[in-house]
Amino acid sequence: MIRDILRSEIERAVNKKVDFNVSTNEKFGDYSSNVAILLKEDPKKIADKIKSPYISKIEIAGPGFLNFYLSEKGLMEGLKKLADCPKQGLGQKIQVEFISANPTGELHIGHGRSAFYGDALANVLEKAGYKVEREYFINDSKESAQIKELGKTILGKGTSYLTSYLKKKLEKRKWKVDDESEVGYAIAEEIQEDNEKFIKSLGIKFDRWFSEELQLREKKEFKKTIELLEKKKMVYKKDGAVWLKTSKYGDDEDRVIVRSSGEIAYFLSDIAYHINKVKRGYKKIIDIWGADHQGHVKRMMAVKKMLGWKSDLDILISQLATLKKGDERKKLSKRKGNIVLLKDLVKEVGLDAVRWFYLEKSLSTHMDFDLDLAKERSQKNPVYYVQYAGARMNSILNKSKLPARRCFASSDAGGQISKPVRNLILKLIQFPETIEDITKDYQVQRLTVYAYELASEFSQFYRDIKVIGSKNEKELIALVALTRKILQDTLKLLGISAPEKM
RNA sequence: CUCCCCAUAGUUCAACGGACAGAACGGCUCCCUUCUAAGGAGCAGAUGGGGGUUCGAUUCCCUCUGGGGAGACCA
């Protein structure tokens, strides 16, 4: 990346250890750095020491920033680096677990956050060179409370989860056994199957569907986990229940892992699951949980410390969506029935617009879900602006008689790079930087910002430069082809289609 | 009562501790003999209050206010 090249050029010039920035901000040169401010040195002196063929000009501005302008060679170098994107992953294994909705009903719009965010994050990490596994945990243990609850409803002894969807599923069903666990599990499997189908239709592919029942409970993993924790002397009995000393490792209090009834608590299952994951040798495990699980973060982190897990564990919390109707704000609640299914939203608004709608927001934002706005946005969504720019690129490439070469080589510039071309190149070379930034801070919405900016930059280029018939047509076609490639890559990471025509 | 998250234009959202806080939608002006006007150019409009750390704070710390979550031997 050109940013890294500039960084090392500066490092060489100052020859000191300092954690400085090299950033882009179109207002201030192509790249800019605060190195002089941090070192409290005369920026001019530092600027004079930097000699690089990639830099054509250094400006000193503001409270001592160095603003860099790339030379033609710098621009071309940046474009060359596009091919080998970032490489920080080096094939390390990362696991991303997301959605993991209970198999007791359909996915609602709250699940959409985890779904699209997790998918896009996994895509980005993959692009950055990590080996990513996407995993979905199915809470389907026959011992678990919600499966039993579901079972009760099925047997007519309760009303939990009783949606029209479930009612339809239960029509004309007769049960030979009178066992809540068994019937609950049977129906949960069917619901899960429906959900998996639906998730696939969203363009999300999981590498592993991890069943709590089959891969933990049936394999006696709960028992093994308790034994392990006992061996570590981390458990004790109180009031007939088994407790884990999580408070020793940063949790607010100790937690029950086996209830006095002998049933296991969900927390134990979660520990067993994470032990299973850790054993697989990931460099990093990323869990995306709903806001209702935020209270569990501390206890899981406590277990990580307690057992000395080697894998990094990042638990991301997706904040709740609230439903807004006019001035009224409602909590999404299954019980109150003001739940909106994700499939209905997709049906109404379209998958591309829905994905954009979700992905442009950071995970920690409390989403105010205004259904009317979402519908309105189906027509005014920025995603169409981005796609439209892509369609224009296609149109140019199709109309030109010249073949689109892969590379926009230095010689193509013909000695002079015009402003619109230059701006477009600068935006292109920010692509790997955006990927790198996201792998560090997981702020996936940067990608939608980037996509929009790239489309916008291209639209200006389109206005100013007539490609077909120009004397530089060959070079410009190569640039357009490259832009299309990067735009397609970006949309692919977001899981959004790139139509050839609109 | 304790813990966690949030508070930015009229609205929905952005902003690795950096410069003059960006977009979109909505409002107001302009631009179609030009490779797709689903486009482009421009105007108006915002960091909840008070402290602190820093050369520099939307960002970090404290506090107040206002929202939302979590606080079961439910998940």
Image (spheres, coloured by chain):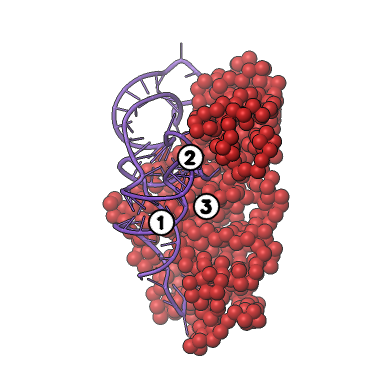
| Residue A191 seen by the camera | no
At label 3, which amino acid type do we have? Answer: Phe
2 or 3: tag closer to the N-terminus: 3
At label 2, which amino acid type do we have? Answer: Val
Q: Residue at x 56, y 40 (%)?
A: A38
Residue A11 is drawn in which quadrant? top right
Q: In the image, which disc is placed on residue A116?
A: 3
> On the rendered structure, is A153 left or right of A185?
left
Q: CA distance from mark 2 to mark 3?
A: 15 Å
Residue A370 image position (x, y, % from top left): 36, 50
Question: Could you say which is closer to the camera, residue A127 or residue B9?
Answer: B9
- Residue placed under numbered mark 1 in the picture: A321
- Residue placed under numbered mark 2 in the picture: A383
State which chain is coloured red.
A
Quick check: marks 2 and 3 in contact, CB under 8 Å?
no
The chain ID associated with circle 1 is: A
Question: Could you say which is closer to the camera, residue A195 or residue A300?
Answer: A300
State which chain is coloured purple.
B
Residue B46 image position (x, y, % from top left): 34, 40
| Residue A240 seen by the camera | yes
Quarter placement of the N terminus of chain A: top right
Residue A210 image position (x, y, % from top left): 61, 67
